[in-house]
Every structure is written in structure tokens, then in C-alpha cells.
Image (spheres, helix red, strand yellow):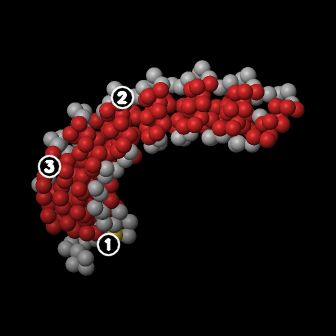
Amino acid sequence: MDYAASIGHFDTVNWLHQNRTEGCTKFAMNEAAENGHFNIVKYLHENRTEGCTQIAMDYAAKNGHLEIVKYLSENRTEGCSQNAMDYAAIYGQFEVIKWLSENRTKGCMTHAMNVAAYRGYFDIVKYIHFNRTGGCTTRAMDNAAGEGHLHIVQWLHENHTEGCTASAMAAAANSGHLSTINWLHENRSEKWKSCTIENAAAHGDIDVIKYLHEKFGTACSQKALKNAIKNTHKKVVKYILDNQSTTSQVDDIQLHGKIEGCQLKRPFDEI
């Protein structure tokens, strides 16, 4: 019966209840709730005594099954845990978050807004800000920057005091979000990490590398150069060598000039 309930086989659940004595466990209602099988949740509640745990409402919230969340809240006593709102935020279930906030007493943790910012759920970020006290950490802006959600980065900057860390620009560079990098440079004071340009070199983001070099005037590290060579980003290697190479870097190029099929030799006239 547990398995039949979990996959939504109502007729099987009904037959087993009517004709067998093995019964089921709390797993049946938990799984039926998680998977959105409202008719089975209702049937088990009305015809069985095993009940469920807080997992039922938590996971129904996670998957956006608001009708089931409401039913469990109105008809059962197990309730939910703080995970319910956290899960709903993480998986973008705005209507579920709103209902839980208005009808249940469990709040959410900073993880909720952090992940909502990372996934670009702007409406959820704002709702938590205006209606809950959980707040966020620097990871919210760091995460949003890494995914290129500049509007969320800007909103957090204007409405929250947590700010970000140097990881914000490093993450943005890793994903090639130049507009986000530019905004962080012009509006935030966090120092940038050497891995910022190293990540850009590894991904071949020549525009990001040029921007970082021109704005910060800092030479690329040996690791940045090696990352570009390893991934055969010839234009990046050429730019690094033409603009900021040292003798040791040139020697390193000559020593590793045939890495991963990248035939490299200055001055890269063929590019």
C-alpha cells in the first residue's frame, strides 16, 4: 500500500485497504503528499489510522501542492517544520510561501533567501524581505552575482546590509557576466580575488579578462595563463602575453607550448 500510494494508484490503495490486512505506514501519506496525490492523502486520512509526519506538508510545500498543504493543515495535527517554507523558497513556490506565511507559525532560515536569490526568484526574495524576519547572508548577493541576476544584486545592495564578499565578482567572472562584474566594480568596495581572472581565463572569457586588466591593472597569475593554455584559449593566451607577460611566463609558454593540442608560440600571428 505504501508504494501504491506513493505513485498515485488510488484503486490499488482502495483494494488493498478493503481486502488485505497488512495496512501501510506513515510513508504512504508522506509520499502521496509529496507527489501531489490529493485523493490518496484524503482517502488515507479518512480510512486509515497510520497518519503521516511533518514530512508530508514539508514536501508538499516543496513541490507546490498547495491544496494538499491546506488540507493537511486543516485536517491533521502533525503540521510542518521550518523546512516547508525553506523548500518552497528554494523551489520557487511563491503561492505556497505566501500561504504558509499567513497561516502557519513556522518561519524560514537565511538559506531560503540565499537560494532564492541564486535561482533568480525575485518575487520570493522580496516577499521574504517584507514579510519574514529570516533575512539572508552575504551568500545571497554572491549567489545572484554568479548567476548574472543583476537586478537581484542591485536590489539586495539597496535594501539589505549584508552585502557580498569578493566571491561575488569571482563567481560572476566564472560565468562570464560582464555587466554584473562592471556593476560590482563601480558600486561595491570588496577586493577581488586572484581566482577571478583565473576563472575567466579557464573559460576563455576574453572580454572579462580585458575588463579586469584595464580596470584593475593587475597582471594575470601563472595559473591564469596555464588555465588558458590548458583549455586552448589562444586569444586569451595572446592577450595575456602581449599585455602583461613576464620572462618566466614566456619561458613557461615555451616549455608547455603543446598543451591539450594548443600550438602556442609568440606572437601568435595566425590568430
Q: Residues within 10 Å of mark 2 (few under 14, many from 20)?
A: few
Mark closer to the chain start, 1 or 2: 2
Looking at the rendered structure, the kind of residue marked 3 is Glu
Residue at image coords 28%, 61%: 205
Which quarter of the figure is the C terminus placed in? Answer: bottom left
Looking at the rendered structure, the kind of residue marked 1 is Gln
Q: Quadrant of residue 53?
A: top right
Looking at the rendered image, the disc whose residue lies closer to the viewer, 1 or 2, is: 2
Image coordinates of residue 101 in percent, x first then y, are: 43, 29
Residue at image coords 25%, 79%: 270
Left or right placement of residue 105 versus residue 150 in this view: right
Q: Secondary structure at mark 2?
A: loop
Looking at the rendered image, the disc whose residue lies closer to the viewer, 1 or 3, is: 3
Residue position marked by numbered label 3 in the rendering: 186
Closer-to-camera residue (244/105):
105
Looking at the rendered structure, the kind of residue marked 2 is Arg
Q: Secondary structure at mark 3?
A: helix
Q: Which mark is residue 132?
A: 2
Q: Residues within 10 Å of mark 1 (few under 14, many from 20)?
A: few
Looking at the rendered image, the disc whose residue lies closer to the viewer, 2 or 3, is: 2
Q: Secondary structure at mark 1?
A: strand
Q: Is residue 183 visible?
A: yes
Mark closer to the chain start, 1 or 3: 3
Image coordinates of residue 207 in percent, x first then y, are: 23, 63
Closer-to-camera residue (267/164):
164
Residue at image coords 24%, 64%: 206
